[in-house]
Image: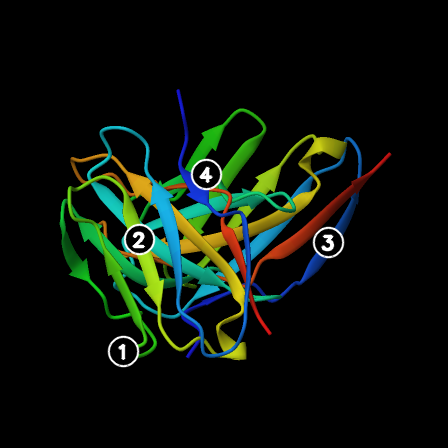
Amino acid sequence: DQQVKQNSPSLSVQEGRISILNCDYTNSMFDYFLWYKKYPAEGPTFLISISSIKDKNEDGRFTVFLNKSAKHLSLHIVPSQPGDSAVYFCAAAINTDKLIFGTGTRLQVFP
Amino acid sequence: GAGVSQTPSNKVTEKGKYVELRCDPISGHTALYWYRQSLGQGPEFLIYFQGTGAADDSGLPNDRFFAVRPEGSVSTLKIQRTERGDSAVYLCASSPAGGSYEQYFGPGTRLTVT
């Protein structure tokens, strides 16, 4: 039972354009959502998060949007840069216990 | 400052052997987590420590897996009678006290069971 789903395994975007990564979840008890970025042979790196009481959080080029009624969140990266090429994982939590991760989306930003 | 470190970075073992994987969390972080990541999947939760005690071990797949954190800092994940299906990257993460959701991950240990 996959509680957090990333249905796009890969995404290719031109440098300077917007990247939009999507994530759906099924458990309405999740109260916090996070995005992690992962390079090969490294551990996931925290990128940005959002509480379930908000619908948007912005940090520089990164913005996360949360639609609770649709149980959907998205990560927007604008403008996209080649260094953004990595695997992005969506994760959700109830309280501060374990994180439940999606399967990841591989983003490639080309010149 | 120093991040989460894990040793060894790679471990190859034969089926049936015993292995130990070590995690050094960020200094001062009271919460420590173990996850397992298989190819093409996201990290899957194994166990969570708050201080020395296991607060949630619901992700351990069976009784061959065990983890300890005797002094509330370094943790060791122990796998007995390894099976080929145990092959994965084992990730450790830590989090500061005070109810922080953000977890900081180490580089992982790649375990290969032959």
- State which chain disc 2 sits on: B
* Pointer 2 and pointer 3 on the same chain: no
Q: Residue at x 15, y 58 (%)?
A: B55
Q: Which residue is drawn at 40% across and 54% down?
A: B21
Mark 2 neighbour density, 10 Å: few (under 14) some (14–19) many (20 or more): many
Of tags 2 and 3, the one toward the viewer is 2
> Residue A64: image x %, image y %?
48, 42
Q: What residue type is labelled 3?
A: Leu
* Pointer 3 and pointer 1 on the same chain: no
Viewer-nearest residue: B80 or A101: B80
First in sequence: mark 3 vs mark 4: 3
Marks 3 and 4, how far apart at CA: 20 Å
Q: Mark 2 points at which residue?
A: B76
Instruction: Mark 3 and mark 4 in contact? Answer it, CB < 8 Å.
Output: no
First in sequence: mark 1 vs mark 2: 1
Q: Name the residue under label 1.
A: B63
Quarter of the image holding residue B30?
top left
**Judging from the image, what secondary structure is the residue with disc 2 in?**
strand
Q: Which amino acid does label 2 sit on?
A: Thr
Marks 3 and 1, how far apart at CA: 39 Å
Relative to A1, residue B27 above or below: above
Q: Mark 3 points at which residue?
A: A11
Q: Which amino acid does label 1 sit on?
A: Asp
- State which chain disc 1 sits on: B
**Judging from the image, what secondary structure is the residue with disc 1 in?**
loop
Q: What residue type is labelled 4?
A: Phe
Left or right, B30 with respect to B83, comes to left
Mark 4 neighbour density, 10 Å: few (under 14) some (14–19) many (20 or more): some
Name the image quarter holding the C terminus of chain A: top right
Relative to A69, residue B109 above or below: above
Q: Name the residue under label 4.
A: A46
